[in-house]
Image (cartoon, rainbow, N blue to C red):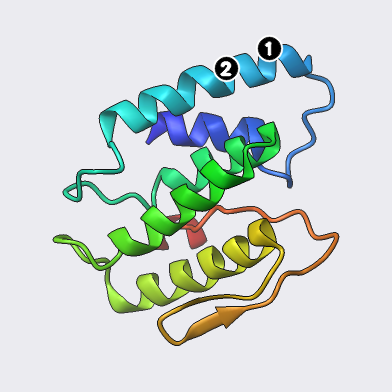
């Protein structure tokens, strides 16, 4: 979780990181994202991905790898129905944030189940889906 938090600090559009050299910021992003994906690979379903994958997706999106960012958001959505499902209220919040992010990344309408979203042009999307304890 600390790696995802560090990645969010570096790449969340809500944070102004203009004071950081871009090459170093992306080098740190590379290291953090590789570690997160190694600890919780996309193929395994046992660990929840909504806690860390949105930060990794944001990194890939900022890096210019839209396809990888989209793939990670889609994996995150599918993981919400996995063996350790999230509580319904948290799940609905996370799904709405992720579907909006997916629509923005794809630049087209996106749906997951009954939740749909259209892209919001010019809006830099943060993919941070907050856990209940973070929303307080």
Q: In terms of secondary structure, where does tag 1 sit?
A: helix
Q: As drawn, is 134 to the left or to the right of 81? A: right
Characterize the local packing of mark 2: few (<14), some (14-19) or many (20 or more) Cα atoms within 10 angstroms. some
Q: As drawn, is 69 to the left or to the right of 90? A: right
Q: In terms of secondary structure, where does tag 2 sit?
A: helix
Residue visible at 77% across and 69% down in the picture? 120
Foreground: 57 or 7?
57
The correct choice, above or below, for 17 with respect to 132 in the image is: above
Percent coordinates x, y for residue 78 in the rendering: 32, 63
Foreground: 125 or 60?
60
Characterize the local packing of mark 1: few (<14), some (14-19) or many (20 or more) Cα atoms within 10 angstroms. few
Percent coordinates x, y for residue 94 in the rendering: 45, 66
Name the residue tied to disc 1.
24
Residue visible at 52% across and 63% down in the picture? 98
Kindly give the residue lying farthest to the bottom in the view shown: 114
Q: Residue 28 carries which label?
A: 2
Percent coordinates x, y for residue 99 in the rendering: 54, 69
Residue visible at 58% across and 62% down in the picture? 102
- Label 1 with label 2: CB-CB less than 8 Å: yes
Foreground: 108 or 53?
108
Task: Give the CA distance from mark 1 to mark 2.
Answer: 6 Å
Whether residue 136 is visible here, answered yes or no, is no
Q: As drawn, is 2 to the left or to the right of 101? A: left
The correct choice, above or below, for 35 with respect to 56 in the image is: above
């Amino acid at each position: 979780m600390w790696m995802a938090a560090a990645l969010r600090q570096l790449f969340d559009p809500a944070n102004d990181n203009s004071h950081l050299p871009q090459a170093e910021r992306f080098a740190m992003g590379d290291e953090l994202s590789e570690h997160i994906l190694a600890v919780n690979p996309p193929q395994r379903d046992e660990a929840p991905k909504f806690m860390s994958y949105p930060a990794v997706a944001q990194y890939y999106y900022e890096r210019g790898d839209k396809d990888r960012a989209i793939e990670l958001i889609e994996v995150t959505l599918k993981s919400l129905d996995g063996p350790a499902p999230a509580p319904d209220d948290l799940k609905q919040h996370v799904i709405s944030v992720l579907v909006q992010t997916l629509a923005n990344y794809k630049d087209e309408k996106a749906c997951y189940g009954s939740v749909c979203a259209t892209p919001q042009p010019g809006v830099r999307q943060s993919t941070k889906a907050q856990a209940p304890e973070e929303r307080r």
